[in-house]
Amino acid sequence: MIWLTSLTKKFKDKIALDRVSFKTKEGEIIGFVGPNGAGKTTTMRLILGYLQPTQGNISIDNLNPIENRINVLKKIGYLPENNPLYQEMRVEEYLSFIADVKNYSDFINIVNQVGLENVLQTKIEELSRGFKQRVGLAAALIGDPEILILDEPTSGLDPLEQEKIRNLIKKLAKHKTIIFSTHILSEVEDIANRLIIIDKGKVVYDGKKPNGKGGVEKLFRKFIKYD
Amino acid sequence: MEKVGWKSYLGNLLNMINLYKKELNYYLNNPIGYITVILFAIFANFFFVKDVFVISSASMKPFFNFLPWLLLVFIPALSMRIFSEEKKSNTIETLLTLPISEADIVLAKFFALTTLVIISLLLTFGLPFSLSLLTKVYYPEIIVGYFGVFLMSLSLLSLSMFFSNQTKNQIIAFLLSAIIIFLLLVLSTDFTASVLPRFLQDGLLSLTPFYHLQNFIKGVIDIRSVFYFVSFTGVFLFLTIVALEKRN
C-alpha cells in the first residue's frame, strides 16, 4: 500500500508539490493526470525514493522509501518518463542485468508476456519506439513487484502499440497496484478504476473514475483551467 | 533503517558484481575502451623506447616519472562518461530506481575502471623484460614502481569519477578532471618550487600525488604515501557517493 501524507516538494523556491495526500489499495489502477509540470513525475519519483520530500511522509507497506530505499524498490516496478534504456545493450543482456539486480530468474516468462521473444538478440538502439517501450515495461515487471509505477507508458506510440500496452496493463492489474500517468484521457477511461487529477502541485480530484464516454475529459476540464 | 544482515551484505555484493560486469562489458564491447587502453599502451611504450634509445637511459625511472603526465589524459578519458553519460541519457534514473545502493553503484563503476587501468598497465609489462636485455634489472624496484603508479591511478580515477558525476557533459567532465590533475602535477614541478615561498612549497608538495609517487619510483614503499593514496581515493569515492545521494 502506498500512503502519502501531506507531501511537499520544493526545488529551490519553486513548489513542485503542495501537501499531496492519498492512499492506495491492492488491485487499484490509478490514472494520474494533469497538465505538464503539474507534479506527476515528481510524485512518482518521491514514491520511489529517487527524490527526497521537503515535507510530509511517504509509506510503502509501512516502509519509508528514503530510510529503506532498497527494500522499497524491491516492491516497485518503474517505467520512467521517456523510458531511458542502455541503448548499446542487447534486449536479453539488458533484461538479464535487471533480473540479476532484482534477483529474479524467470524473466523469459515476462519476455513472452510482453512479446519480446523475437528481438532478444537485437540491440535496444535498433528497436522501434514501441518495442523499446515493451523493453522498459518488461524491466519494470521483472521481480514480480506488488506496485507498478508507469510514467506515460504510451507516450509517443502509434495507436496500435498504445492499444497493446493498455491491454498488457489491464492484464497485469489483478494482483498489483498500478499508478500510471498519461496525457491521453481516453486511456484513463479505458484502464483506470480510480482517477487522481493534479494541478500546480496540488491534488484537485481524487476519486472514482466517472462512468460514460467523455466523463474523464469533462472532469478534467472542470478542474483544470489553462491560463 | 535498512536491514544490514549478512544476506543483505551478500545481496549488495552480488548487485555490485552484476553492475561491475555490465560496466566492464560496455568498455569491452565498445571501440572507445579499446582505443583508450591501446593509445595508453602505445604512448607509454613509445616514450620508454625513446628514453632508452635516444637518451640512452637504461632505467624504468624516467618511464615512471613520465607516466603521471600520460595519466593526466588517460584517466579523464577513461572515466569521463562513467556518470555524465548516464545523466545525459537519464539512465541514471533507471539505475537509481533499481534495488542497488549508491555506494554499490559507485564502487562497481570504480572497480570496472580499475580493471581497465590494470589491463593498461599490464600492456607495459614487456618493457622491463626488454630492458633486461640491455642491462641488469632489479625487479623488486620495478614492481614497487608499478604499485605506486597503480595507487596513483586509483586516486586520479576517483577524482575523475567525482567530476563525471557533476555534469551531463562528457567533455566538461574530461576538462575538469584533466585541469585538476594538471594543477596537482604542476604543483610538484621545479617551476612551482621556484615561484612559491619555501613553507608553502613544502606544504603543497606533500599534498600532490606525484610527490608521493617518488618514493615508489625509488623502490621504497612508504606507508605514509600508501595512506595518502588510499585516503585520496576514499575521500573522492565518498564525495561521489554523497553527490549521487543528493541527486535532487
Image (cartoon, coloured by chain):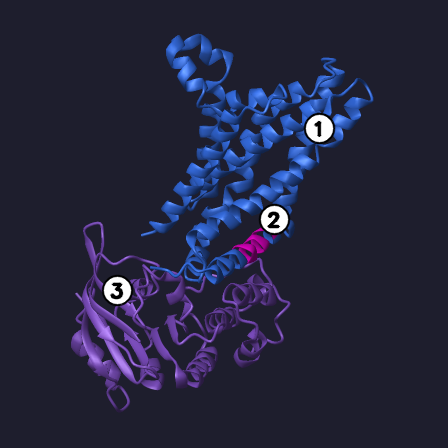
> Which class describes the residues within 10 Å of circle 1: few (<14), some (14-19), or many (20+)?
some
**What secondary structure is the stretch in magenta mostly built from?**
helix
Label 2–label 3 contact, CB within 8 A:
no
Q: Which chain is blue?
A: B
> How far apart in space, not on screen, are marks 2 and 3 (Cα)?
37 Å
Badge 2 marks a residue whose secondary structure is helix
Q: On the image, numbered disc 2 is attached to which residue?
A: B27
Q: Which residue is mark 3?
A: A39
**Span colored in magenta:** B16-24
- Determine if marks 2 and 1 fall on one subunit: yes
Q: Where does residue A141 sit, x and y in percent of width and height?
A: 47, 74
The residue that disc 1 covers is: B45
On the picture, is A29 further left or further right than B121? Answer: left
Q: Position of residue B132 (x, y in %)?
A: 79, 23
Magenta segment: does it hold A35? no
Nearest the eye: A219 or A12: A12
- Mark number for residue A162? none
Position of residue B92 measured from the top left corner of the image (x, y, whole percent): 44, 55
